[in-house]
Image: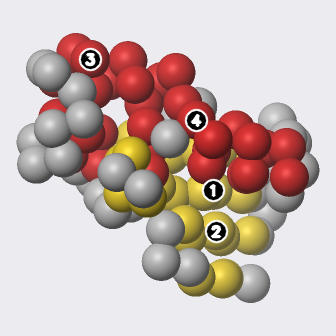
């Protein structure tokens, strides 16, 4: 089963993967949005299985820095993604 929304792709198979994209919601890039990834995905949707991963799409972490300007430098962009709950890069 694959469901699509403008901000999240969720794939369910023998494993589970939530893939953040380069968009932003309310000015916050999706892969740096703790509310979106932790509160909504993990808590509200109960995305808590050890086989369920949050991954960034291609250059989503770079996009936190350029073009979004949410982070001041690449290191801050990586920290924002990790602190929001991103666990791997796709």
The picture places residue 4, in percent across and down from the top left corner, at 58, 82
Callout 3 touching callout 4 (CB < 8 Å): no
Cα gap from disc 2 to disc 1, whole angstroms = 6 Å
Callout 3 touching callout 1 (CB < 8 Å): no
Question: Nearer the observer, disc 2 or disc 3?
Answer: 3
Residue that numbered label 1 is attached to:
17
Q: Earlier in the sequence, mark 2 or mark 4?
A: 2
- Within 10 Å of the Cα at label 1, are there few (<14), some (14-19), or many (20+) other Cα atoms? some
- Within 10 Å of the Cα at label 3, are there few (<14), some (14-19), or many (20+) other Cα atoms? some
Callout 4 touching callout 1 (CB < 8 Å): no
Residue that numbered label 4 is attached to:
34
Q: Residue at x 73, y 51 (%)?
A: 41
Q: Earlier in the sequence, mark 4 or mark 1?
A: 1
Cα gap from disc 3 to disc 4, whole angstroms = 15 Å
From this viewpoint, is residue 39 visible? yes
Question: In the displayed structure, would residue 86 be above or below residue 72?
Answer: below
The picture places residue 75, in percent across and down from the top left corner, at 22, 15
Q: Is residue 34 left or right of residue 52?
A: left
**Viewer-proximal residue among 4 and 50:** 4
- Within 10 Å of the Cα at label 2, are there few (<14), some (14-19), or many (20+) other Cα atoms? some
Cα gap from disc 2 to disc 3, whole angstroms = 26 Å
Tag shown at residue 76: 3
Question: Nearer the observer, disc 4 or disc 1?
Answer: 4
Q: Quadrant of residue 50?
A: top right
Q: Residue at x 43, y 37 (%)?
A: 32
**Label 4 element class:** helix
Tag shown at residue 10: 2
**Residue sitting farthest toward the front:** 26
Question: Nearer the observer, disc 3 or disc 1?
Answer: 3
Q: Earlier in the sequence, mark 3 or mark 1?
A: 1
């Amino acid at each position: 089963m694959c469901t699509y929304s403008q901000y999240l792709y969720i794939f369910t198979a023998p494993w589970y993967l939530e893939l953040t994209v380069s968009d932003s919601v309310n000015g916050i890039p999706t892969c740096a949005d703790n509310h979106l990834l932790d509160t909504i995905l993990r808590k509200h949707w109960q995305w808590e299985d050890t086989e369920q991963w949050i991954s960034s799409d291609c250059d989503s972490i770079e996009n936190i820095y350029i073009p979004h300007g949410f982070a001041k430098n690449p290191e801050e962009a990586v920290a924002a993604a990790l602190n929001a709950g991103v666990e791997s890069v796709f």
